[in-house]
Image (cartoon, coloured by chain):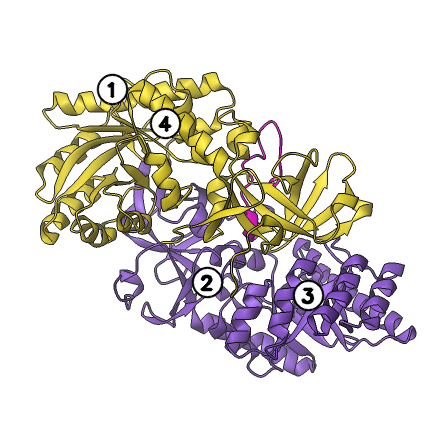
Chain colours: A yellow, B purple
Amino acid sequence: MTETPRRLADLPTPALVLDRARLSRNIQAMTDRYRALGVRLRPHLKTAKSVDVARMAVDGHFGGIAVSTLKEAEHFAANGFRDILYAVCVSPAKLDQAARLIKTGVALTLITDDLDAAKAIAARGKELSVVFDVLVEIDCGEKRSGVPVESDTLMAIARTLHAGPGSRLAGILVHAGHSYACRTLEAVAEVAEIERATGARAAERLKTAGLPCGTVSVGSTPTALHGKRYDGVTEVRCGVYMFGDLFQSEIGSCGEGDIAVSVLSSVIGQRRPENRVLIDAGALALSKDRSTANTPHDLGFGRVVDLSGTTGLGAVSVVGVHQEHGMVEGRTPLPFDRLPVGARVRVLPNHACLTSAAYDRYHVVDGSDEIVAVWPRCNGW
Amino acid sequence: MTETPRRLADLPTPALVLDRARLSRNIQAMTDRYRALGVRLRPHLKTAKSVDVARMAVDGHFGGIAVSTLKEAEHFAANGFRDILYAVCVSPAKLDQAARLIKTGVALTLITDDLDAAKAIAARGKELSVVFDVLVEIDCGEKRSGVPVESDTLMAIARTLHAGPGSRLAGILVHAGHSYACRTLEAVAEVAEIERATGARAAERLKTAGLPCGTVSVGSTPTALHGKRYDGVTEVRCGVYMFGDLFQSEIGSCGEGDIAVSVLSSVIGQRRPENRVLIDAGALALSKDRSTANTPHDLGFGRVVDLSGTTGLGAVSVVGVHQEHGMVEGRTPLPFDRLPVGARVRVLPNHACLTSAAYDRYHVVDGSDEIVAVWPRCNGW
């Protein structure tokens, strides 16, 4: 309706803010780590869902990315990315959409953990005149998806994909999602080693059987940050590290001062008797993610900081949400005079992926409240 | 990229499905109730965020609607709605946007519970050459927003708004959000009576002081459904009743067979040893709302039913979510043969407002799996 304001102080709220300095620092640290390790990094764009962020994340690496939806794959492909891993087990009904993308010249890799799905992929590829590159997903203890590494099913899926004719066995994928349940960095390092060893063992089984295994892809932000060795691994995937969030901070994957994404919000009410203010960031603006519920500090639905993005308000968090209302409380008396109706605050999210998904764009700042760019997101399916 | 498929069986998943027959029935029941009561119904569009649904909901009523964001207000105004209540306490920075809408001829009503905000509204209206119609929000026990009915603050806000010059005191608004905490219909009826009596008492105070009080607006879906009397009330607001959801079903506001909105999803993995399947509806597709956690039946992140939308799978629900994965389990052995990878299911949501917000459109069905319409939603801010 009108031009985007140039300062956070003038932006309609709630709005999603991205701190480019923190983003750059987080990305550079991971880039430096993987260049030093000599291991390929495949940034996962499920968190950022942004071409602008993706370009920063692949800089200095081989250019491949991971995505969580085919819509993301199409979006990044349309913006120049040519090596894309769709890192969720594919449903056969999505193969036609995947084939259309491959025919535009994109090196799209799929994953599966199901023998019948592998057969469907091999058959449908032939019908569609493409060859699908497919990784077999291995479970390393999370019990979400993936076959057991010592299972006959692994070999049956691998042989099916290798036989084709509409598929090619591209290798192995492992995701140690249970690293998020760790509460010490030593525990994360142990899970990282299990993830690595599982991938390496699966590759050994394929090679012993005379099957190809070009790719051994592992990763999650905690295991990518805290693993000690990556031998036997060809590439590491991770995504949340770019933004960080309160949950990652609580489990030691970043500091609270590294969190690059926040929700700009306005005070819409005061309740002094209850030591509470209301803000216009509620369940939709923050998400109902409660992943800090069982971490050292329960930060409710997000930590509230001042407009500058620092922790200038003390131990203040969003303790409850309604659709468009956030209830803000502190452990000590709130500075009500600094929080009149209309005052602006920023909320650091529990879970960057979930909170960001409510917005169609980032308002990018870089060390001041000036909005230096607006970057679109690719939401939905 | 391609045309929308004509059947749910061909629709890319996850996708949001709206059952028009159930929607019509839910809307008709509320319409009949309020026409019989002789009380004006102002449908709240925060759940549906759809012009098509709004047209059905106002049919037979006076045409006014409530919204939860100014973006919704603009969207509905652009589609012919002329009497719009923005039912969240307004931040002064939003007044310029509100004034632009009023200048297009929309009868937009704002609300506030803050004296400084009331002063800002009265002053800013004059600067912008509009007169803002404003309701004073009264708390009736939820302690979210609203001033106490017997407070001096109520009278001070009312006098400020009445004095103008850029504002007009339009009346009173009460929202008994704590009706959601009730676990019996008798308890809901009691809260409804408190909500009604609070509104009536606030109006009495204004009139006794010689102040106008044209509107006494009350409502929430439970209190709108189960109140016994509405004397002293001029209009009732509610929104979730159109769709229903598992939480509303658990607290008795609808039956599970009345739930009109669901998420179409595909099976993407089986884990027979754990009696579990994985679907492609996870935290983003369902939301992380856990409002059934403390109801008679904990339905996890949603009840899983078959493609027809009935409960043909038994007591099966989504027990855990990752960003794009839902973990489905049952209390009895799952019918794995009916749930191969690629099979389609529908997930009834815990909370219709939160789940629907992840989608930009509804795929409308009406008694079969044929998609009879696609209705856009107005998301974000």
Q: Which residue is mark 3?
A: B223
Q: Could you tell me if the residues under marks 3 and 1 are in contact, i.e. CB atoms within 8 Å?
A: no
Q: CA distance from mark 3 to mark 4?
A: 56 Å
Q: Magenta includes A295?
A: yes
Q: Position of residue A22 (x, y in %)?
A: 50, 33
Determine the residue positioned at 20% across, 24% down.
A203
Depicted B269 relative to depicted B254: above or below: above
Q: Quadrant of the C terminus of chain B?
A: bottom right
**Which residue corresponds to the image point at 30% horizontal and 47% vertical from the top-left?**
A76
Q: Are marks 2 and 4 on the same chain?
A: no
> Residue most toward the right?
B209
Identify the image quadrant of residue A175. Answer: top left
- Label 4: how many Cα within 10 Å (few below 14, some 14–19, many 20+): many
Q: Which residues are magenta?
A: A284-302
Residue B227 can be seen in this image: no
Disc 1 secondary structure class: loop
- Looking at the rendered structure, the kind of residue marked 1 is Gly
Tell me the subunit letter for badge 3.
B
Give how far apart the Cα atoms at labels 2 and 1 are.
Answer: 47 Å
Q: Identify residue for label 2.
A: B261
Chain for numbered disc 1: A
Q: Chain of mark 4?
A: A
**Discs 2, 1 touching: Cβ within 8 Å:** no
**In the rendered image, residues at marks 3 and 1 fall on the same chain:** no
